[in-house]
Amino acid sequence: MMEQELKQINFAFIGFGNVGRAFARLLINRRRWLIKKYGVEWKITGIATNNHGTCIDARGLPVQKILRSWKAHSNLNNFHNGPSRNSHSDFIRQCGADVLFEMSILDLNGDPASTYIREALRAGLNVITTNKGPVATNFRQLSRLARQRDVQFLYEGTVMDGAPVFNLVRQNLPGTHIRSLRGILNSTTNYILTQMEQGTSFEAALDYVKKKGITEADPRLDLEGWDSAFKLSVLIQALMGGSVKPNDIERHSISEDIGRKVRAAVRRDRRLRLVARAYRQGGRVIGKVELQELEIFDPLAAIRGLSNILVLNTDTMRELAIIENNPSVEQTAFSLFSDLVSIL
Ligand SMILES: NC(=O)c1ccc[n+]([C@@H]2O[C@H](COP(=O)([O-])OP(=O)(O)OC[C@H]3O[C@@H](n4cnc5c(N)ncnc54)[C@H](OP(=O)(O)O)[C@@H]3O)[C@@H](O)[C@H]2O)c1
């Protein structure tokens, strides 16, 4: 492809944690592929964080250099080259991006990420996020706003990382009605439950997932079933047309005393799993996150460690299962990449 035919596209990041940095590495790895396949050349013109500073440079930030020198105390302000910016609203207005990748942390109210996304959509930016907070709490409003502004609002990474869930239904299940769904959507609790089956303690299992960066910034959001409830809420709103918010979802938690139940299930040749499910009842959709003792031949019982599963019960394909085996942050980064490619 000739140089002059290349289309230039500018990206901005809100959040430069595990996911943001993994996504930046993936973009660098796929730079040639994007040029060859889509004639697209990209640059990152802005990165905003909470405590690691914020920078904008219309010429493109030196992202390789930023990644190479990244440390816990790195400060992105050192890379800023432009007018002063006092808030994230200023950042969104000034970052000069075509696509904003929103990768800040889960908050039960969905804020401030919902505000960032709203402001970006209003300013005519496409938005791609891995943050289930704003999607679950403001799904309809943000989707409508994106349609009104004729931009895209995509969120594949909010459920099962890069495994195609929303893109699969959108692109490959035309005219399909989803009757119900069930799955294991939270890696932290599934890792703890399945490690405890083998005699590992609750604390040791939790420690492992924390160290691996798998838990939410506040691990209570995993243990108390909130992460599963947020994902279930996104699934219900995006795939089943329901309006169930995370607070409407009945939730079970897991804590240290779960060991007794785990062992009792194993003795009965069953398995304890944290199951997220949604079903239709009298014209409404109901969502629940429950600890269930499953028969050993249930496909959900076979899901171990960090792995996830989602089983869709449809009127076209009957039951269709998506399994993601031992995901890491690279798979979350891939969700952003696959959403990006879908809008090129
Ligand atoms: N990790 C995974 O595998 C995974 C999988 C699926 C979905 N997700 C979702 O992806 C998002 C990012 O996850 P992560 O693992 O990258 O988290 P992380 O490592 O904790 O990084 C979060 C980033 O967001 C920034 N941030 C936090 N609060 C902010 C605020 N109020 N305004 C602007 N920036 C803010 C942080 O700033 P500082 O750098 O200054 O702290 C940090 O750069 C989360 O919503 C998570 O639920 C993650």
Image: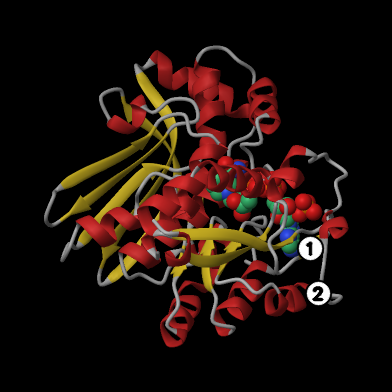
Q: Nearer the viewer, residue 280 or 264?
A: 280
Q: Residues within 10 Å of mark 1 (few under 14, many from 20)?
A: many
Please say if 183 is above or below 141: above
> Considering only order in the chain, which callout, 1 or 2, is on the residue closer to the N terminus?
1
Q: Kindly identify the amino acid type of the residue bearing the numbered disc 1.
A: Cys
Q: CA distance from mark 2 to mark 1?
A: 12 Å
Report the residue marked by disc 2: 87
Task: Name the residue furthest left.
Answer: 316
Please say if 299 is above or below 220: above
For the question of whether residue 122 can be seen, the reply is yes
Q: How many marks?
A: 2
Q: Write the residue at 49% across / 23% down.
A: 194
Q: Is residue 267 left or right of residue 208?
A: left
Please say if 182 is above or below 148: above
Q: Kindly identify the amino acid type of the residue bearing the numbered disc 2.
A: Ser
* Residue 324, x across and y down, in percent: 39, 35
Report the residue marked by disc 1: 55
Q: Residues within 10 Å of mark 2 (few under 14, many from 20)?
A: few
Q: Are marks 2 and 1 in contact (CB under 8 Å)?
A: no
Q: Nearer the viewer, residue 20 or 38?
A: 38
Question: In which quarter of the view is residue 45 placed?
Answer: bottom right
